[in-house]
Image (cartoon, rainbow, N blue to C red):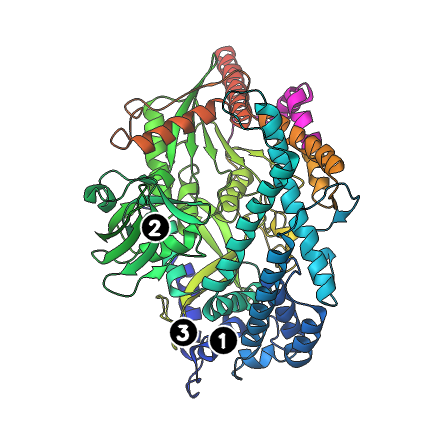
């Protein structure tokens, strides 16, 4: 097994030793809020990669962000509320972080709760009366473009327009449904007035659920968690605070393993409903839980059950998961309306569908291996658990057995993960050498290297990326690009996250383990390409750029005002890979294809137009609204059709893996659907064509070399 240099462990250990000296000699704060906030402040000041001064200016940033997080659409707080809160708290949050009594988030939360109940009453009143959709008026839904309302009259008007727009959306859909089904047997044709009432009732259900969530699932603790995150993410977008249950959930998602009951849940009309049962799981073995059952309450063993009113799926999942061998009791409403308490003992559930998997793409010229990696996962607590680089190595080995002519690695939507795993994974495709450079807050760069001279796979390679390929994905793509080892294919650039985080528990010694007070995922370092440039903000620019649907959406790191800046350091010495092809020629061949491809031209034009539709006001007049929506829907429908190939490519599972999940029908159906989606993937088709170009070029070079050898003799 390849190992990370000891230097990275030394760097991190140094931070932890520094933490040991923090917070000593101080008296215990009076509540957990003060304790947590003070520890977070010390950690940010003394260990964050690029800490801001915690002063009045920082306090004002936190004030603005927290209020925005509570009320992003400016439908709760009034201008008077803002002035009162600003006057007392805007410049004192820094004092709270340094140990003063915690008051701001409680005061803001109390005001929020009061305004929330007032807003609930306003909404209820407005939705009692029919809307008319003939008046030519518009609504702004972007809170950043609005001021806080000056009085109750303005607040009521803001809610009226918002609710009218929500009802208009549903009313228009119902009109379309009536038009499509008119004349069909059994279809009841309703009047415009009846449809408007149905639309209003649908809107009321959505709004009622919103206020239910505020009442039942937005406690002081929840508001405090939002408040602490407003502080940490102002330092940079990736420093986050996790309460213990959220940290456990994060670890589970990273490892692909958890202890639960083996039931998939979905949110349906305010209910948490069972959608499927995992074969062999505790839920499956009990036989007492079926798809369609509604989970109303969750109890930990014999403790008092928690009502799930106002909960979303993620909230419910966190309650249902827990430690292995512990009991969870679910109060369930069966499909016949009866209530039943189902007792289950948690056991290990492996999310093997989230691990690396592969397929084969065949065409007239070649057989290309395809590897899908959704994230750089790692089970840090289990030495025998799944690691992404080990799983990818296994998939590469299987593809080599099938004698593939080239490999495509798909990192689209891969948000990153384990730094260790990405270094090891890059080492599978190159000889020994640097993979990424890492710099700490003391400006001491270190180089993470692959020290194993062996290469698992040396053939043609392409890496697929998009705007959501981030962090570890960008390290891998950058290393492959800098070495000239493969071709990067995708959007103009990847996400642009060039920072390294570490999870640190909030106990008094800042240990690396989880803490009962919570955990901070803290930005400790910044990483750089081996060519010296950072991927921060700029990401990785694709060698072959393919227009996609997300290009004009503001979703990258550079679109976050709190993101750290781009910079560069010295290049790390490395030797280019002898690729056997000319990248410029590969790019020219791709450009020729794309220039003659009307599909990608349309995707680019449509996406640019759709991006502009997000920055406008919306009409509340029926005819105008329907004209606007018709154009938007037509464009979206066209794009959805464009990204699916008219003629499917030949994608198959590896031999002996066609029925790899035959023991679980739901998993097998999802696997079959995955293969089906690949057969219509216009981007995979282009990636395969690029690899074919690389193969053809390499064969041409080999052929010429062979001719030269013959001439020499």
Instruction: Work out how far the residue at label 2 is from the one at label 1, CA to CA, in angstroms.
Output: 35 Å
Mark 3 residue element: helix
Residue drawn at point x = 38 percent, y = 26 percent: 672
Label 3 packing within 10 angstroms: few (<14), some (14-19), many (20+)? few
**SS at circle 2:** strand
Return the residue nearer the eye: 460 or 291.
291
Q: Is residue 197 above or below residue 357?
A: below
Magenta segment main secondary structure: helix
Evaluate if marks 3 and 2 touch, with contact meaning CB atoms under 8 Å apart. Answer: no
Is 14 rendered above or below residue 495?
A: below
Q: Which comes before the other along the chain, label 3 or label 2? A: 3
Judged by depth in the image, the label closer to the viewer, 1 or 3, is 1
Residue at which label 1 appears: 37
**Residue highlighted by disc 2:** 295
Query: Residue sitting at 44 percent across and 85 percent down?
Result: 30
Percent x, y of residue 666: 33, 33
> Mark 1 Cα within 10 Å, few/some/many (few <14, many 20+)?
many
- State how far apart marks 3 and 2 are (Cα): 46 Å
Q: Earlier in the sequence, mark 2 or mark 1?
A: 1
Residue 244 in sight in this render: yes
Magenta stretch containing residue 368, yes or no? no
Disc nearest the viewer among 2 and 1: 2
Q: Is residue 598 magenta?
A: yes
Distance from the alpha carbon under mark 1 to that under mark 3: 21 Å
What percent of the width, then of the height, locates residue 267?
A: 44, 46
Q: Is residue 419 left or right of residue 622?
A: left
- The residue carrying mark 3 is 17
Figure check: 644 above or below 483? above
Location of residue 278 in the rendering, given as x and y in whole percent from the top left corner: 28, 40
Image quadrant in which you'd find residue 429: top left
The magenta-colored residue range is 578-606
């Amino acid at each position: 097994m390849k190992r990370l240099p000891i230097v990275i462990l030394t760097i991190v250990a140094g931070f932890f030793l520094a933490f040991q000296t923090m917070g000593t000699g101080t008296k215990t704060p009076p509540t957990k809020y003060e304790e947590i906030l003070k520890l977070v402040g010390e950690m940010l000041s003394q260990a964050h990669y690029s800490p801001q001064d915690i002063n009045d200016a920082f306090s004002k940033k936190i004030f603005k962000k927290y209020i925005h997080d509570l009320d992003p659409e400016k439908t709760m707080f009034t201008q008077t509320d803002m002035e009162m809160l600003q006057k007392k708290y805007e410049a004192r949050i820094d004092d709270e972080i340094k140990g003063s009594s915690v008051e701001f988030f409680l005061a803001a939360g109390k005001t929020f709760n009061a305004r929330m109940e007032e807003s609930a009453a306003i909404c209820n009143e407005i939705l009692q009366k029919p809307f008319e959709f003939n008046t030519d008026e518009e609504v702004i839904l972007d809170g950043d473009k609005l001021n806080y309302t000056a009085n109750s009259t303005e607040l009521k008007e803001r809610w009226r327009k918002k609710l009218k727009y929500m009802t208009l959306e549903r009313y228009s859909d119902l009109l379309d449904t009536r038009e499509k089904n008119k004349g069909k047997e059994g279809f009841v044709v309703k009047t415009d007035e009846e449809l408007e009432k149905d639309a209003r009732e649908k809107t009321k259900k959505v709004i009622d659920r919103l206020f239910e969530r505020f009442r039942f699932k937005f406690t002081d603790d929840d508001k405090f968690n939002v408040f602490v995150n407003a502080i940490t993410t102002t330092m940079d977008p990736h420093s986050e605070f996790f309460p213990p249950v959220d940290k456990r959930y994060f670890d589970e998602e990273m490892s692909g393993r958890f202890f639960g009951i083996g039931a998939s849940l979905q949110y349906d009309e305010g209910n948490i409903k069972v959608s499927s049962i995992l074969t062999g799981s505790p839920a499956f073995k009990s036989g007492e839980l079926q798809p369609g059952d509604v989970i109303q309450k969750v109890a930990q063993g014999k403790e008092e059950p928690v009502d799930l009113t106002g909960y979303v799926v993620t909230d419910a999942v966190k309650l249902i998961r827990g430690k292995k061998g512990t009991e969870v009791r679910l109060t369930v409403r069966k499909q016949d309306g009866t209530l039943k308490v189902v007792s289950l003992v948690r056991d290990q559930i492996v999310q093997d569908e989230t691990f690396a998997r592969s397929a084969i793409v065949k065409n007239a010229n070649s057989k290309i291996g395809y590897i899908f990696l959704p994230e750089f996962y790692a089970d840090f607590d289990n030495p025998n658990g799944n690691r992404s680089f080990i799983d990818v190595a296994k998939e590469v080995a299987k593809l080599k057995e099938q004698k593939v002519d080239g490999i495509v690695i798909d990192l689209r939507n891969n948000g990153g993960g384990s730094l260790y795993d990405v270094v090891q994974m890059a080492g599978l495709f190159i000889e020994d050498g640097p993979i990424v450079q890492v710099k700490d807050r003391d400006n001491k760069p270190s180089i993470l290297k692959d020290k194993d001279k062996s290469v698992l796979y040396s053939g043609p390679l392409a890496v697929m990326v998009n705007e959501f390929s981030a962090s570890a994905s960008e390290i891998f793509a950058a290393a492959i690009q800098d070495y000239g080892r493969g071709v990067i294919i995708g959007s103009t650039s990847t996400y642009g996250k060039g920072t390294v985080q570490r999870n640190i528990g909030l106990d008094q010694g800042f240990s690396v383990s989880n803490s009962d007070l919570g955990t901070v995922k803290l930005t400790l370092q910044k990483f750089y390409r081996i060519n010296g440039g950072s991927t921060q903000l700029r990401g990785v620019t694709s060698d072959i750029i393919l227009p996609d649907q997300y290009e004009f959406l503001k979703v990258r790191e550079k679109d976050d005002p709190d993101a750290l800046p781009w910079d560069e350091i010295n290049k790390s010495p490395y030797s280019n890979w002898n690729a056997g092809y000319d990248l410029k020629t590969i790019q020219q061949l791709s450009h020729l294809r794309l220039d003659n491809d009307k599909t990608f031209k349309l995707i680019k034009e449509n996406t640019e137009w759709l991006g502009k539709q997000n920055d406008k006001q919306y009409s509340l007049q029926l005819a105008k609204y329907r004209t606007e929506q018709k154009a938007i829907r037509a464009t979206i429908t066209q794009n959805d059709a464009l990204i699916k190939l008219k003629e499917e490519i030949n994608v198959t599972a590896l031999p002996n893996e066609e029925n790899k999940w035959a023991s679980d029908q739901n998993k097998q159906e999802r696997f079959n659907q995955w293969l089906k989606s690949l057969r219509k993937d216009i981007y995979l088709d282009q990636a395969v064509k690029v690899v074919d170009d690389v193969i053809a070029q390499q064969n041409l070079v080999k052929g010429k070399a062979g001719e030269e050898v013959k001439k020499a003799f």
